Amino acid sequence: MPSVLTKFLFFSFCFFLLSCKESKTNDKLIEWSGQAMGSTFKISYKDSLSRNLSKEVDSLLLIFDKELSTYREDSRIVKLNQSDSCIFVSNQEPAFLLDLLEKSIQIHKMSQGYFNPTLMPLIEYWGFGSKNKEMVKEPNQKTIDSLLQFCKMNEISVTESENGKLICKKDKKIQLVFNAIAPGYAADLIGLFLEKKGIQNYMVEMGGEIRCRGKQNKKYGWIIGINTPREGVEKDDIQVITELNEMSLATSGNYRNFKTDGKLKYAHTLNPFTGFPEKNELLSVSIFTKECSIADAIATACMAMGKEKAWKLIQEQQIEAYLIYSDSEGNMQTLMTEKLKKWIKE
């Protein structure tokens, strides 16, 4: 089966360039930023040929959007969500949806169900979705319980078919949304694309999730900041900085994306077992792995678990992590893995 990037190169001529905010070439350092997937991105890389690859990258992002955007009626994920049973994906088509689904199934099992991309009905109910933006005024337990019946990752399957694969749902009301893994996955795709072009030193940031390879300069790797998880702080308010070389970093937190009914605040991280926005002592979780998609998904799962279960998962899976949490007196505290102490520059 052709790789995702091979398919991209075949299909990219069919799509137009997305507009970028800024594009500049400075000696051998290429940098540009723009908007995609409802958020922003920034790409920096060093190239001895001084190539500006923004057109190719933007075409890749456009294909990605057409595969996975829940805001587009013509996207493949919307077609799957609206399907009564199965959709077919041929070997000649982009495989972003398939690839993400298979990764998600693996992480769902690893996290014991805390990472669950089938929460779309509940996301819409709480006002965090693409259709409903209003906070539910009086949460109803019976309604939430009824919606939980359609939030089952184990009722989606991928099977081999002639010249492709079938994605099937046991119930037509099951719907997928990959917001908790798609930014990291997009960062991986762009990084792999740059590597195919022979670029070894780069930083790709998609919606806050980051993939780094090589070095920023002769002396250091890429210097990346982790935000202070406090409501109302600016995005450049940094809790700690870290140096990344051959790693990715994804951070999940509830201090920016929340709803309020005038009395209570409801964070966007939903507990897949209760159906309610999760409330625990964690303020943010930063996960460091090779693949940004894996870090993105695990960070979300950890926020839904709470500190104790998250720390257990991190140790069992031997993942590098930086946790910021609130203690019993409301003071901000941090917890990090041993290896990470060499990367953190406080």
Image (tube, rainbow, N blue to C red):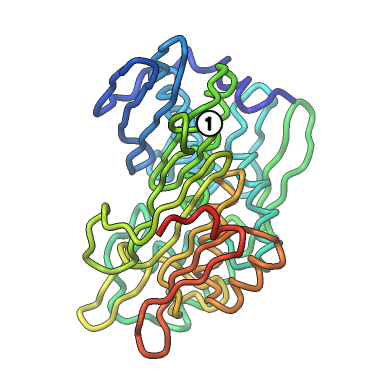
Nearer the observer, 219 or 235: 219
Residue 55 position within the rendered picture, expressed as x and y whole percent measured from the top left: 39, 17
Check disc 1: other Cα within 10 Å, few if <14, some if 14-19, many if 20+. Answer: many
Is 55 placed above or below 162 here?
above
Find the residue positioned furthest to the front: 219
Q: Is residue 197 left or right of residue 283?
A: right
Is 270 placed above or below 180 here?
below
- The residue to which callout 1 is attached is 191
Q: Residue at x 46, y 43 (%)?
A: 210
Residue 213 position within the rendered picture, expressed as x and y whole percent measured from the top left: 54, 34
Q: Residue at x 26, y 74 (%)?
A: 260
Q: Residue at x 28, y 20 (%)?
A: 24
Would residue 147 be visible to someone looking at this image? Answer: no
Q: Is residue 85 left or right of residue 186?
A: right
Disc tally is: 1
- Mark 1 residue type: Gly
